[in-house]
Amino acid sequence: EDQVTQSPEALRLQEGESSSLNCSYTVSGLRGLFWYRQDPGKGPEFLFTLYSAGEEKEKERLKATLTKKESFLHITAPKPEDSATYLCAVQKTDSWGKLQFGAGTQVVVTP
Amino acid sequence: GAGVSQSPRYKVTKRGQDVALRCDPISGHVSLYWYRQALGQGPEFLTYFNYEAQQDKSGLPNDRFSAERPEGSISTLTIQRTEQRDSAMYRCASSGTRRMHDTQYFGPGTRLTVL
């Protein structure tokens, strides 16, 4: 059975304290892995797509990496505005239209 | 704005009533997706369309749920004979091309409460 597991469930950081979020997956035929950010009361906002092991993508203080079994979202020197829930999702080669999401990691960055 | 819009934003209904939730995708987007999101969880796939054709409805929980997109633009998700367990946030997303589904852009959602 396909699974997407995110850890930790919640993360509390001091401003400037770098950390990493994990998304592990067991999927037959991965086509792509997606990271989204979700603020309270809002819809998920797209961040990155990764397609192959070894691929990395960066945006401001965020960097996403992908291996054959997991993806990491690194937050470097976070600011309070980085507080959000971060969701990862997998897309399979035989069902492109369907994203399977993890439960998310809730990140709180305090000044 | 040019994003995905959904209406109503909030819907309260009584058990047994039918509800219709509407999604207006980003202009020109070929593909449209419906998800359901419980509190503290990620979105759960329900169904999706390319143009007006429903490609995958494997996530619809039972036959009380149906969706249509008759002209390949606006979509309606209908829940018949609502039950309390149907209470959730219903989210719609759209993406630009048929060949590359890749980036799905989400709307603000419709919060459904069944009393």
Image: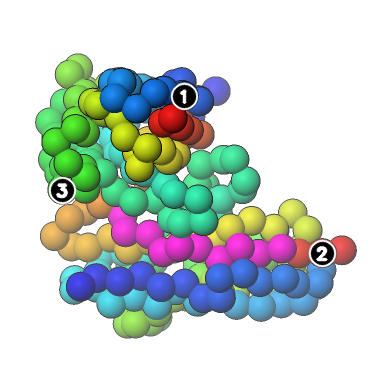
In the rendered image, the vertical position of residue B22 relative to residue B61, given as above or below? above
Query: How far is disc 1 from disc 3 in space, using C-alphas?
Result: 26 Å
Where does the image place residue A66, in percent across and percent down from the top left?
41, 76
1 and 3 marks on the same chain: yes
In the rendered image, the vertical position of residue A81 relative to residue B23, given as above or below? below
> Which residues fall within the magenta stretch?
A99-108
Of the two numbered discs 2 and 1 in the rendering, the one whose residue sits closer to the viewer: 1
In the rendered image, the vertical position of residue A3 relative to residue B97, given as above or below? below
| Residue A88: image tag | none
Q: Are marks 2 and 3 in contact (CB under 8 Å)?
A: no
Query: How far is disc 2 from disc 3 in space, using C-alphas?
Result: 41 Å
Is residue B25 at all visible to an observer of this figure?
yes
Horizontal side, residue A42 vs residue B36: left or right:
right
Of the two numbered discs 1 and 3 in the rendering, the one whose residue sits closer to the viewer: 1
Q: Residues within 10 Å of mark 3 (few under 14, many from 20)?
A: few
Q: Secondary structure at mark 1?
A: strand
Q: Which residue bears the numbered disc 1?
A: B12
Q: Which residue bears the numbered disc 3?
A: B58
Horizontal side, residue A104 vs residue A27: left or right:
right
Is residue B91 at all visible to an observer of this figure?
no
**Amino acid on which the number 1 mark rests in the picture:** Val
| Residue A110: image tag | 2
Q: Nearer the viewer, residue A1 or A58?
A: A1
Look at the image and say whether residue B46 sits in the magenta stretch. no
Question: Of marks 1 and 3, which one's residue comes earlier in the chain?
Answer: 1
Query: Which residue is painted at 47% across and 72% down in the image?
Result: A6
Q: Are marks 2 and 1 in contact (CB under 8 Å)?
A: no
**Amino acid on which the number 2 mark rests in the picture:** Thr
2 and 3 marks on the same chain: no
